[in-house]
Amino acid sequence: MTSTRVEPQPSALAGGASGSVRRRRAYRQERNGPFFWVGIVILALIFVIPLLWMFLTSFRTVEDSRRIPISLIPDQLTLRAYKLLFADEQNPVFTWALNSLMAAVGHAVLVLVVASMAAFALARMKFPGQKVIFGIIIATMFVPGFIFLMPNYLMMDRLGWLDTLIALIVPGAAGAFGVFFLRQFFLAIPRELEESARVDGANSWQIFTRIILPISKPGLVTLGVLAFLGNWNDFIWPIFVLFSPERLTLPAGLSTLQGAYNIDYPVIMAGASVAAIPVLILYVFVQRYVIEGVATSGLKG
């Protein structure tokens, strides 16, 4: 019994190549078509309208914020909500913002230190059980975060860190996502750079600090921003571990503005607008690094 091998015909290859060109051309035409831009505008409005609504509501009166049917444009602009927010001594907004800033920055720095060292070991070094350890780390990403609330609370209690900012900085610093994200980024760095450094006499620590980290600036900035935003916006964990009003973070402190029987929506929206300003400023300055870091981290698995 003989087998017959079917060779691809030049016409078929030409047809495949021309088919690929046609698909790219069709995709380019579709991208430049009206439906593409209509979809982009709709998506932009979905994300922008809630922010615009929050900002405009902070300038409304209480009666206007409860009016039905609702309207996007306020009937009367007023600074009442911001005056109440910053003038009330029972609402130390600046202290809450400073607590959030210190906790978020400290947490982001600690995440970068732990995740970069762990990712370097998993991506650039060889040791027994490396794949098993990485698999266990990845498996923890599928465990719901609420499961860790009580163990972390008991740990903070034993260490005497309750009602301190350390309780917001340390837990979660060794998260699986940061290790996975930077490992993917480190894998994309050419091995030739590391081999050349070893030929010149560099050890693993020198390669890590002088070659890997400077090259990985977009990935480090991206992870730092994600860790900062996660800690800045966290609401549940600060409520668990902080008890003193002056120790609260901004999201936890803003929740105290809501009364049991009366809700002043303009004041709450004013606080939310203040909380969103640092995030928007951070995004403006690091947007380029974030896009580059996310695009580069998935090049190699």
Image (spheres, rainbow, N blue to C red):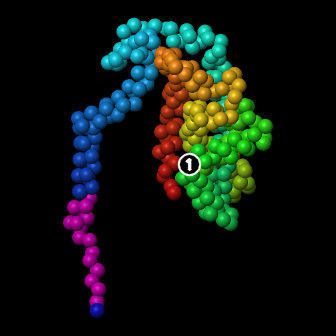
Q: Quadrant of residue 187?
A: bottom right
Classify 286 as above or below 25: above
On the question of residue 174 being in view, the answer is yes
Does residue 228 show up magenta in the picture?
Answer: no
Tell which residue pokes out farthest to the front in this image.
Answer: 261
Residue under circle 1? 144
Residue at 61% from the left image edge and 9% from the top image edge: 87
* Image position, residue 13 (x, y; %): 25, 64
On the question of residue 274 being in view, the answer is no
Image quadrant where one finds the N terminus: bottom left
Classify 49 as above or below 14: above
Which amino acid type is shown beneath numbered disc 1?
Answer: Pro
Does residue 15 show up magenta in the picture?
Answer: yes
Q: Quadrant of residue 124?
A: bottom right
Residue at 27% from the left image edge and 55% from the top image edge: 20
Tell which residue pokes out farthest to the bottom in this image.
Answer: 1
* Image position, residue 244 (x, y; %): 71, 25
* Image position, residue 144 (x, y; %): 56, 48
Horizontal side, residue 163 vs residue 4: left or right: right
The kind of secondary structure element at disc 1 is loop
Q: Depth check: give the residue in front, 99 or 4.
A: 99
Q: Depth check: give the residue in front, 261 or 293.
A: 261
* Image position, residue 254 (x, y; %): 57, 23
Q: Report the span colored magenta.
A: 2-17
Residue at 72% from the left image edge and 31% from the top image edge: 163
